[in-house]
Amino acid sequence: MLASALGLMGAFVYGGADFLGGLASRRLSPFAVTGVAAGSGLLLLLLAYPFVGGAWSAEAVLWGSLSGISGAAGISLLYACLAIGPMSILSPLTAIVSAIVPLTVGLVRGATFQPIGYVALALALVAVLLVGFVPEKTAVRPSLRGILMAIGSGAMIGAFLVLIDLTPDDSGLVPLFFNRAVNGSIMAVIVVIALVIARRRPDAATRSRPGLRGALTLALCCGLVDAVANTLLLLGLRLGELAVMSVLTALYPAGTIVLAAVVLKERIATAQIVGLVLAIAAAAMLALA
């Protein structure tokens, strides 16, 4: 029961981080936002380490670092495919693939449930699709490039979940240190390369963007919130099954939707409300299973 609660809570917190990151990306490069967020998240994890602890080992370093690579690839592909659009199709496609990959790995590794558990997993997958649905009146059919990017993003995010699950049970926050460090380093390299290319253009202007300080603040907060979500995910994986946590974590759009409705006064579609209700019901059923 506790693992399911942590999974659902972590999904909403991940959604909150995405909301903050999305706002910051309106004024700052998404790669820069991700890099700044990785730095602030790493700092929070280091501050929390004396209280949470964790054993250092080669396995914790290896799997944590690899999860940082897969996470960086997943986020980059996610931003890219959503920029191509339409979000109403590519967003839920990414979420469902990110759930199916670790769900399959978990079942192959021997995870078993009572009959109600399998029904709950199927119900949760439907909830992921409904929650991730973003109604767009002018939506067009997605391109093959956008679909492939969405599938790749979901696969990389799913791989992140699998790799974090492979870390030793006694490693505590150690894998997340290396996840953040590697993720931030990759994004920093991308940003530096982009800046060098931009400065070499004849028409490049060195103008400061309006609201840059606010964007940096949002990016910093995004990293702090995302670090909390990572910790909840790690605790849930230690207490529960990868198959369950992967499906519940894929409900991360729910947190973004709720915050967008409260803060930005955006309307929540009926399908999304149904998805939120199904998600809570599925989490309760998984707790029983």
Image (cartoon, grey):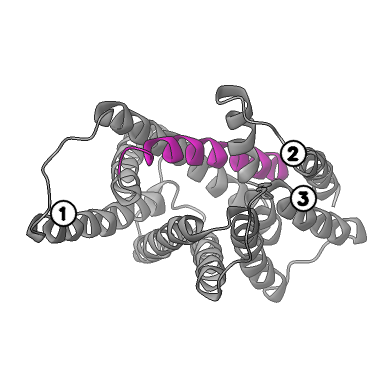
- Which residue is labeled 3 in the image? 127
CA separation, marks 3 and 2? Answer: 13 Å
Query: Are the residues flagged by discs 2 and 1 in contact, CB closer than 8 Å?
Result: no
Identify the residue at image location x=59%, y=66%.
142
Q: Are marks 1 and 3 in contact (CB under 8 Å)?
A: no
Q: Which residue is mark 2?
A: 269
Range covered by the magenta-colored residues: 1-28
Query: For the residue marked with disc 3, what is the amino acid?
Result: Ala
| Amino acid found under the numbered disc labelled 2 | Ala
**Secondary element at tag 2:** loop
The quarter of the displayed image where residue 259 is located: top right
| For residue 245, side relative to residue 205 (left or right) | right
Q: Amino acid at mark 1?
A: Leu
Chain-order first, disc 2 or disc 1: 1
Q: Main secondary structure of the magenta part?
A: helix
Image coordinates for residue 277, horizontal then vertical, percent:
81, 39
Does residue 114 belong to the magenta stretch? no
How many C-alpha atoms fall within 10 Å of the one at disc 2: few (<14), some, or many (≥20)?
A: some
